[in-house]
Image (spheres, rainbow, N blue to C red):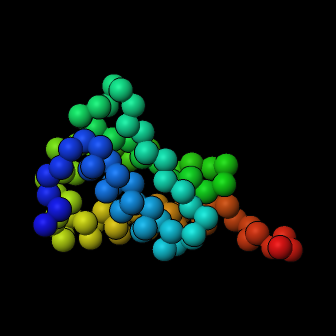
Amino acid sequence: MFSGGTYHEVARWLWNFLTAHAKRVDPRIEVVLDEDDEREGKSYGARLRFGHRFGPPLEFAFRDVADHRGSLAWCSALADRTRGLARELVADQGVADVRPR
């Protein structure tokens, strides 16, 4: 299915996957993916951002994501984890945004 791929293809898939599941909790959540030169071909770092606040860092090995992105069980577990972190991030805000639009 989606297993394998280049470092940048897998990075794009990971960002899209995390974003899709985080935004199911709140559409204002953004995903910041760290794929700097030191990580190139080895790993990714990701964080969820809600306004000015960031969730805890998530670490992913490139090979792990590339090999398992076609696995329903692996993707389901990552989706659950992402939504859980997104719910915590939103709940930590504590106050709803009630400004007039």
Answer with left or right where residue 10 lies relative to residue 71: right
Q: Quadrant for residue 80, please give it.
A: bottom left
Q: Residue furthest top?
A: 38
Tell me where residue 12 appears, x and y as whole percent. Answer: 34, 52
Quarter occupied by the N terminus? bottom left
Identify which residue is drawn at 18% across, 49% down: 5
Tell me where residue 82 appears, x and y as whole percent. Answer: 40, 62
Answer with left or right where residue 51 lies relative to residue 37: right
Quarter occupied by the C terminus? bottom right
Residue nearest the viewer, comparing 3 with 47: 3
Q: Quadrant for residue 89, please give it.
A: bottom right
Number of callouts? 0
Identify which residue is drawn at 62% across, 60% down: 92
Tell me where residue 70 appears, x and y as whole percent. Answer: 16, 64
Identify which residue is drawn at 34% across, 67% down: 79
Identify which residue is drawn at 25% across, 66% down: 75
Answer with left or right where residue 77 lies relative to residue 85: left
Answer with left or right where residue 86 lies relative to residue 46: right
Tell me where residue 42 appears, x and y as whole percent. Answer: 23, 34
Res 70 seen here: yes
From the viewer's perspective, is residue 72 above or below residue 69?
Answer: below
From the viewer's perspective, is residue 55 above or below residue 18?
Answer: above
Res 84 seen here: no
